[in-house]
Image (cartoon, rainbow, N blue to C red):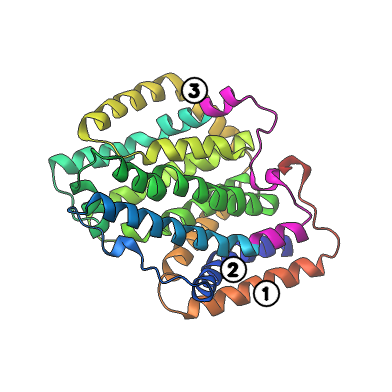
Amino acid sequence: MNARRAAALLEVLGVYVTGQYVSAVLTSALPLRIENPLLHINAQMTNAELLSASRDLFIILVVQYAGWFALIIPLNWWHRRAGPAAYGLTRAGKTWRALLAAGAAAAAFAAWPEISVELLDRVYDLGPTAPWRQALFDMSWRRWEFWLFAGILSYAFVAFMEELFFRGYCQRRLAEDWGDGPAICGTACLFVFAHGQYLLLNAYNVALLASLLVLALAMGVVFARTRSLWPSFVAHALINVPMTAFWQMLSLAGCLLATALLWSRGVAAIKRVFSRVSWTWCAVLSTIGAVYAVLSQYGSVAVYVAAVLLGLAVALEAMRGGDRTAPSSLL
C-alpha cells in the first residue's frame, strides 16, 4: 500500500466517524433539544405524532450530514475539487433518459434478493427486526403522514444523502487512488454495516445484510459506469419504497424479468468496471469497511481513533505537496 492509497483510505475512515462527532457538537451548540423519534415509534401513532416525528427526524438527519460535509467540503477544496461534479452531481455527458434507465436497471438487477427475503419472512418467520422497523410495518400506510415520514427516512431524503456521502464522496475518493473495484467493495461494506438496525443475529437480518450488500455493490457499479450520482440515487429510491406483499410479488416478477432481459448487459458492465482489478485489495478494503463500520458504533474511543486517522491522511497528503489533483478520468 503506497502513501496515496493510505491517505485516501485513512481520509475516508477518519471522516466517517469524525463527521459524526462534528454532528454531535453542532447539535449541542444549536438550540435543539430533539430526541431521535425512532426510539418512540409505535404502530398506534397519530397523524400529528407522525408529522412531529417527521420534523424531528429531518432536523436530525440534516445535522448529521452537515457534520460529514463540514469536513468533506474543505477537504475537496484542498484537493482542488469544487462544484457539484465533485460529488457526482452531474449528468457526465449523458441524457436524463439514459441516467434514469441505468438507475432503474440497477434496481431491477439487484433488488430481487431483498424482495425475496421480505416475502419469505411473510411466510416463515425468519426472526425479529429492529422495534422501530416493526412498528412501521404494523402501522397504517393509508395516510400521507406515513409516506412523508417514510420519504424522509428511506426512499427520498435519506436515499439521496446516503448516495451523496457513500458514493459521491467515499467511493469517489477511494477510486482516485485505489481504482473502481476496491473502492466499490470497500464503500459497499462500509455502507452495509453502517446500518445498525440489521446487526441482529438471526436469519432475517443476516439475509437482509447479504441482500443489502448486493444492492450496495450494484449502486457502486452504476455510479462507476456512469460517473453520475443520479442513477444510483434512482436505484436507491426505488429499492427503499415501502411495499405491501402484493406489490412485492409484482416487483419481484418485474425484477426477475428485467434481470433475464438485461443479464448480458449487466454482466458486461460489471466485467468492465472490475477489469484488471486486484481481488486481494477488494477483499482487504471490504474487510476494513465492514469491521470499521461495526466497531465505530461502540465506544467513544472510536472518535479519537478517527481523528488520528484523519490527521494522518492530511499529513500524507501534505507530504505529496502540489500533486493533489484528481485523475482526469474521475472529473
Q: Which residue is mark 2?
A: 14
Q: What whole-number distance in Å separates the C-alpha atoms at marks 2 and 1? A: 8 Å
Q: Residues within 10 Å of mark 3 (few under 14, many from 20)?
A: few
Residue segment shown in magenta: 72-101
28, above or below 120, in the image: below
Whether residue 274 is visible here, answered yes or no, is no
Residue 189 position, x and y percent, is 47, 54
Q: What whole-number distance in Å separates the C-alpha atoms at marks 3 and 2? A: 39 Å
Secondary structure category for the residue under label 3: helix
Hey, what amino acid is under mark 3? Ser
Name the foreground residue: 65 vs 245: 65
Query: Does the magenta run of residues contain 130?
Result: no
Q: Which residue is mark 3?
A: 264
160, above or below 31, in the image: above
Hey, what amino acid is under mark 1? Gly
Earlier-in-chain disc, 3 versus 1: 3
